[in-house]
Structure formats: structure tokens, C-alpha cells
Image (cartoon, helix red, strand yellow):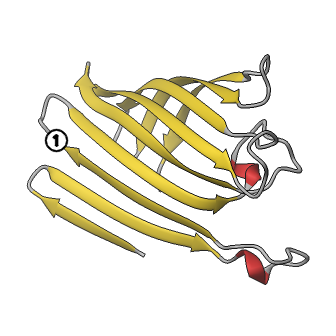
Amino acid sequence: IGATYNANNFALRLIVDTINKKSGPNLGDVDDTVRVTLGGSYDFGVVKPFLAASYFKDGKVSAIPGADANAGVYDGYGVVLGANAPLFGGTLKATAGYLKADEQNKADAAAEDVSRFIVGAGYEYKLSKRTVVYADAGYGQDDFDNRDADKPSYFQAAVGMAHYF
């Protein structure tokens, strides 16, 4: 379920979604995942900042890379702040985000709570109405409770071209 509001250069969006986990095989007595996201942006012309926040309940562990495959479900929140700005005929993009997720249904001493920080930047240039070239890079780091030395980090970069039909 979603709702969008647009007025002049301002946009606001609310999304509420759920995953029906009880309909899958061998899942037992599990609660459905629920997520609520609110985000907005304002186009100032020289820069278009955006901010979004999301709350989730009973999220699957597969959504948290690096977490124990036998771990339970997570409750938590995430926040992302970013901006797009015109530069040399293209668009410069930057973003930063933070996630905090607490593992549920385990004693505090055994729970693998996680906090995550991410940053990214990119550039997009339109070669034509339907063709764009891009380059981007991002970095993230996780911090798991109950794993003193384990702070996995990851880096990703991409360069490419997309043509839209």
C-alpha cells in the first residue's frame, strides 16, 4: 500500500508493505514481516536532497548479509540521506545511510544485533533521450553485537551503459 504527494518541487511518499511468511512451506509459527517507509525530496534546482526512514518488524535474516544463517528475525529501522545535483551536463549522486536491527526471540546475550553504515557516490550522463552512461561506488560496514572482532565491510563499484526501449 502506498501513497504519494507531489506539489511543485516537493515529493513525499509513504509505503506500507508486508510479507506473508505463513504461506510458505515448513515455516512453522512465524510472524509476517511488516515494513513502513516514509521519504521525501525537494528539488531546489541546483540540488535535490532526499531523506527516507523505514521501520521493519520480523524481517528475515537473509536481508542482513553476514548474519548467522540460523539466526531468527530482526526488528529495526533504517535512515538514508542523499542528494542529486547537475554537474557537467550529467547528474552527480551521493548517499549515506544507517541501519540498526535487533535480533528477536533470543536472549540478549545470544542475539546478533547489527548496525550498518553505508556511503555511496555516482555520476550519470545522458548520451541521448534513451541512453545513459554511469559510474558509481559504495562502501558499507556492519557491526555485530557478540562478535567483538567481526566487523565485515564491503565495497562495490560499477561502470556501465543503459539503453531504455
From this view, report whether residue 33 is shown above or below residue 55.
below
The residue where tag 1 is placed is: 43
Q: Is residue 143 above or below residue 49?
A: above
Q: Position of residue 79 (x, y in %)?
A: 43, 41
Q: Left or right: 6 with respect to 57?
A: left
Q: Nearer the viewer, residue 74 or 133?
A: 74
Q: Quadrant of residue 156?
A: top right
**Residue at point 66% right, 36% down?**
114
Q: Secondary structure at mark 1?
A: loop
Using residue 111 as the reference point, say whether residue 44 is left or right of it.
left
Q: Residue at x 25, y 36 (%)?
A: 49
| Count of marks placed on residues | 1
Q: Is residue 139 left or right of residue 95?
A: right
Q: Quadrant of the N terminus?
A: bottom left
Percent x, y of residue 144 = 72, 31
The image shows residue 77, relative to residue 152, as above or below, that is below
User: Is residue 114 among the parts visible in the rendering?
Assistant: yes
Residue 145 is drawn in which quadrant?
top right
Q: Which residue is more in the foreground, 101 or 121?
A: 101
Residue 165 point in image, percent of width and height: 47, 56
List x then y, in percent, for residue 23: 77, 83
Q: Quadrant of residue 129?
A: top left
Residue 21's place in the image compared with 74, above or below, is: below
Residue situated in front as seen by the camera: 128 or 7: 7
| Badge 1 amino acid | Asp
